[in-house]
Image (cartoon, rainbow, N blue to C red):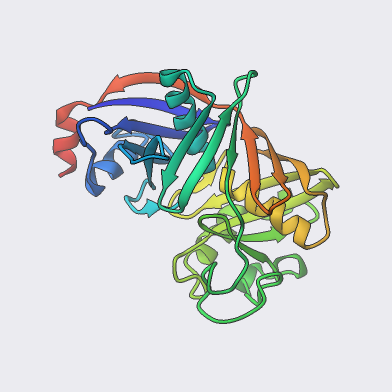
């Protein structure tokens, strides 16, 4: 089984093209492939499948634990770049579980993705009970502090819980992420963000990804954080998000669609040994 290893600002993916033969790994094989010691290693495994127009392909996203995710902005940029180079087109439409995403390949090598409209209703996040999503009533136990008492919730194709803090280095995301990811208020689990406002057009961000852990970059997390900051009156609608792996440009554009722009890279191409896949079963 052939694969590509790609990344968007260090958020890395194993990409498998199943558009022609439909060959894709199962959950146990995904866990083995994603393992950084026993397999290839990745934050998510991406399967490219055939799709009907107007989509150019269907993209499935799997976490290292084998669970399926709804959206991934960095992976969308990666597959858009592949299809764009394959077809010679500058516009590529990618269908995901979360919906159809339009992308544009830029002259400087970056890719812009229209991540769609954010959702704020408590049932849309989803939350287990009705409450304001602008300031969640969610205690975080021994980690509780005034800064960690009222996160903002946004669904950007997947659920996000964003904390705005004075200094992100003053909080341990590795301790904050797991209990909130599995909190009873989030029946479908959640990404967890720590965000620091640097300027009205700049945010420093770190993300705990649901089913993955801390990653160098999270596209949907950057979009959700930008939207949450605007809702709180903290920033402008066009900004730069600094993640561990680099910078993303986010715009909450007129019409309420969120546009994300960032780089992608191809690490290498390879083939999965049949023995690796057999051992996973």
Residue depicted at 63% across the width and 18% down the height = 107
- Rendered-image quadrant of the C terminus: top left
Going by the image, does 234 lie left or right of 255?
right
Residue 104 lies, with reference to residue 63, above or below; the image says above
Q: Can I make out residue 71 in this image?
A: no
Going by the image, does 271 lie left or right of 199?
left
Q: Nearer the viewer, residue 180 or 17?
A: 17
Residue 110 in picture, x, y percent from top left: 61, 25
Residue depicted at 58% across the width and 74% down the height = 122
Residue 44 in picture, x, y percent from top left: 41, 41
Q: Nearer the viewer, residue 88 or 178?
A: 88
- Rendered-image quadrant of the N terminus: top left
Residue 40 lies, with reference to residue 165, above or below; the image says above
Residue 211 lies, with reference to residue 123, above or below; the image says above
Residue 73 in picture, x, y percent from top left: 53, 42
Going by the image, does 182 lie left or right of 33?
right
**From this viewpoint, which residue is outermost toward the bottom?**
130
Tag count in the figure? 0
Q: Can I make out residue 124 in this image?
A: yes
Going by the image, does 191 lie left or right of 244?
left
Residue 264 lies, with reference to residue 164, above or below; the image says above
Q: Nearer the viewer, residue 47 or 6?
A: 47
**From this viewpoint, which residue is outermost toward the front?**
53
Residue 15 in picture, x, y percent from top left: 36, 32
**From this viewpoint, which residue is outermost toward the right?**
199
């Amino acid at each position: 089984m052939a694969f590509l290893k790609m990344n968007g600002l260090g958020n890395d993916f194993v990409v498998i093209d199943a558009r022609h033969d439909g060959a894709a790994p199962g959950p146990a094989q995904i866990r083995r492939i994603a393992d950084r010691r026993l397999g290839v290693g990745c934050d998510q495994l991406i399967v490219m499948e055939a799709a009907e127009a107007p989509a150019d392909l269907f993209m499935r996203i799997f976490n290292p634990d084998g669970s399926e995710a709804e959206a991934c902005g960095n992976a969308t940029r990666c597959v858009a770049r592949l299809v764009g180079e394959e077809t010679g087109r500058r516009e590529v439409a990618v269908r995901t579980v979360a919906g159809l995403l339009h992308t544009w390949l830029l002259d400087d090598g970056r890719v812009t993705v229209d991540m769609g409209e954010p959702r704020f209703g408590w049932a849309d996040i989803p939350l287990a009970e009705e409450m304001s999503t602008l300031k969640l009533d969610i205690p975080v136990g021994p980690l509780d502090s005034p800064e960690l008492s009222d996160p903002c919730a946004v669904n950007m194709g997947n659920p996000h819980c964003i904390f705005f803090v004075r200094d992100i280095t003053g909080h341990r995301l590795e301790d904050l992420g797991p209990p909130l990811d599995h909190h009873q208020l989030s029946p479908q689990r959640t990404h967890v963000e720590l965000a620091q406002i640097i300027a009205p057009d700049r945010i420093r961000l770190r993300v705990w990804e649901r089913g993955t852990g801390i990653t160098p970059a999270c596209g949907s997390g950057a979009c959700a954080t930008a939207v949450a900051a605007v809702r709180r009156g903290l920033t402008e609608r066009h900004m730069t998000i600094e993640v561990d792996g680099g910078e993303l440009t986010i715009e909450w554009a007129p019409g309420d669609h969120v546009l994300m722009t960032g780089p992608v890279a191809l690490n290498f191409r390879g083939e999965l040994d049949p023995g690796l896949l057999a051992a996973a079963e």
